[in-house]
Image (spheres, rainbow, N blue to C red):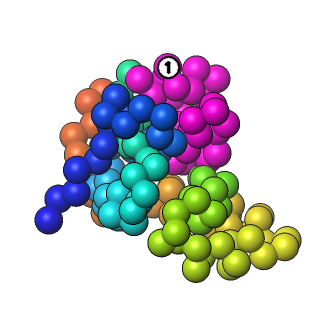
Amino acid sequence: MDVHLTHPAERAGADVVIYDGQCRFCIAQVSTLAKLDLGKRLAFLSLHDPLARTLCPNLAFADLMKQMYLVTRDGRQFGGADAVRYLSRHLVALWWLAPLIHLPRTTPFWNWLYRQIALRRYWFGRIDCPEGSCRLDR
């Protein structure tokens, strides 16, 4: 069953998850997040949507391609593993993950693991990528 990913225009005041909307793996992960968002606190936005650049004018397209970003309602930005950490504290369904991902001195490991997964995300397939828009630079 497909999950409706709520656009920021549909949920004013929500934290916004910016993800690669041309990546099948990424779409599956944010669909899971949408299911776990029992309090309806999140909205979802493909990095390929022009609104993404408006929400994150300080980030280049290449930055957005490297990792998922979460933009809070007060404008703070969290990328990659830091976004997962934020979500583990703010979504009740992910509280079980918080003690593990917040262990002292494990941040470098989680950042490394996130980067490894992000670099290989297209192994799971991708939706059409016009003009090389899916290029992943290391």
Which range of residues does the magenta coloring cover? 51-79
Mark 1 residue crowding within 10 angstroms, few (<14) / some (14–19) / many (20+) = few
Residue beneath the point at 68% across and 67% down:
110
Q: Is residue 60 magenta?
A: yes
Tell me where residue 103 sits by quadrant: bottom right
Left or right relative to 113: residue 41: left
| Image coords of residue 77 (percent x, y) | 64, 39
Q: Is residue 63 magenta?
A: yes
| Image coords of residue 88 (percent x, y) | 59, 65
Left or right relative to 106: residue 69: left
Query: Can residue 132 be seen from the camera position used here?
Result: no
Residue beneath the point at 85% across and 71% down:
105
Tell me where residue 57 sits by quadrant: top right
Q: Which residue carries the number 1 mark?
A: 54
**Residue found farthest to the front:** 39
As shown in the figure, which amino acid type bears the numbered disc 1? Thr
Q: Nearer the viewer, residue 79 or 76?
A: 76
| Image coords of residue 11 (percent x, y) | 37, 37
Identify the image quadrant of the N terminus.
bottom left
Left or right relative to 28: residue 137: right
Label 1 element class: helix
Residue beneath the point at 31% across and 43% down:
6
Q: Is residue 89 above or below residue 103?
A: above
Q: Nearer the viewer, residue 50 or 23?
A: 50
Residue beneath the point at 84% across and 73% down:
104
Q: Nearer the viewer, residue 79 or 75?
A: 75
- Number of numbered tags placed on the structure image: 1
**Residue found farthest to the left:** 1
| Image coords of residue 100 (percent x, y) | 68, 79
Query: Can residue 9 be seen from the camera position used here?
Result: yes
